[in-house]
Image (cartoon, rainbow, N blue to C red):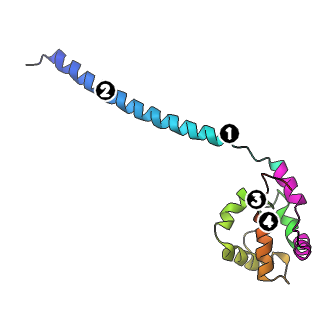
């Protein structure tokens, strides 16, 4: 028969082993989390000033698109103060692009949030909107123009 002191001792030993095992599991998860957080911190940070400068100097190569861009898109998509994603800022454009080109063109045509209907280009065709969206959404923030 076990004496009360032996019972308490074996019970304490059992709890200690369980605690040690759980502590190892928690520490392992913490280590892995900190490791990946550390890796993400090593990726180059995007400089907001560089992204803004890039947006302000970007220009479509196609002369016709450049003219439309100058009169309709540039006003909002090159100013940090607007809620419009900046030209070339792939990170800002990504959630919009994920919705699909059809949704983006619909937002341009009908207006959405701060976006005025037709993006202030009443004579633009759908294919021009698509080309302008492609131009503006192309990530050039990591390699400025």
Dot 4 corresponds to which residue? 136
> Callout 3: helix, strand or loop?
loop
Q: Residue at x 28, y 27 (%)?
A: 15
Dot 2 corresponds to which residue? 17
Q: Comparing marks 3 and 2, which lies closer to the viewer?
A: 3
- Residue 83 screen position, x and y as percent: 77, 61
- Residue 70 screen position, x and y as percent: 91, 70
> Callout 1: helix, strand or loop?
helix
Cα distance in 3D space between marks 1 and 2: 37 Å
Q: What's the mark number on residue 42?
A: 1
Q: Is residue 59 magenta?
A: yes
Disc 4 or 1, which lies upstream in sequence?
A: 1
Cα distance in 3D space between marks 3 and 2: 53 Å
> Callout 2: helix, strand or loop?
helix
Disc 1 or 2, which lies upstream in sequence?
A: 2
Q: Residue at x 84, y 49 (%)?
A: 49
Dot 3 corresponds to which residue? 139
> Mark 2: few, some, or many residues within 10 Å (few <14, many ≥20)?
few
Q: Is residue 5 left or right of residue 78?
A: left
Q: Evaluate if marks 4 and 1 touch, with contact meaning CB atoms under 8 Å apart.
A: no
Q: Quadrant of residue 52?
A: bottom right
Over which residues does the magenta segment extend? Answer: 50-71
- Residue 12 screen position, x and y as percent: 26, 22
- Residue 92 screen position, x and y as percent: 72, 58
Cα distance in 3D space between marks 4 and 2: 59 Å
Q: Nearer the viewer, residue 122 or 51?
A: 51
Q: Evaluate if marks 4 and 2 touch, with contact meaning CB atoms under 8 Å apart.
A: no
């Amino acid at each position: 028969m076990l004496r009360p002191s032996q019972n308490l001792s074996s019970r304490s030993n059992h709890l200690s082993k369980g605690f040690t095992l759980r502590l190892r599991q928690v520490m392992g998860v913490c280590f892995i989390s900190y490791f990946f957080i550390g890796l993400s911190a090593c990726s180059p940070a995007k400089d907001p000033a560089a992204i803004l400068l890039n947006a302000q100097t970007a220009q479509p190569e196609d002369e016709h698109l450049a003219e439309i861009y100058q009169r309709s898109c540039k006003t909002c998509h090159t100013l940090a103060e607007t809620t419009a994603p900046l030209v070339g800022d792939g990170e800002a454009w990504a959630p919009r692009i994920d919705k699909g080109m059809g949704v983006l063109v619909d937002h341009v045509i009908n207006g959405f949030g701060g976006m005025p209907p037709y993006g202030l280009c009443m004579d633009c065709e759908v294919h021009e909107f698509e080309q302008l969206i492609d131009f503006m959404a192309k990530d050039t923030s990591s390699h400025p123009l």
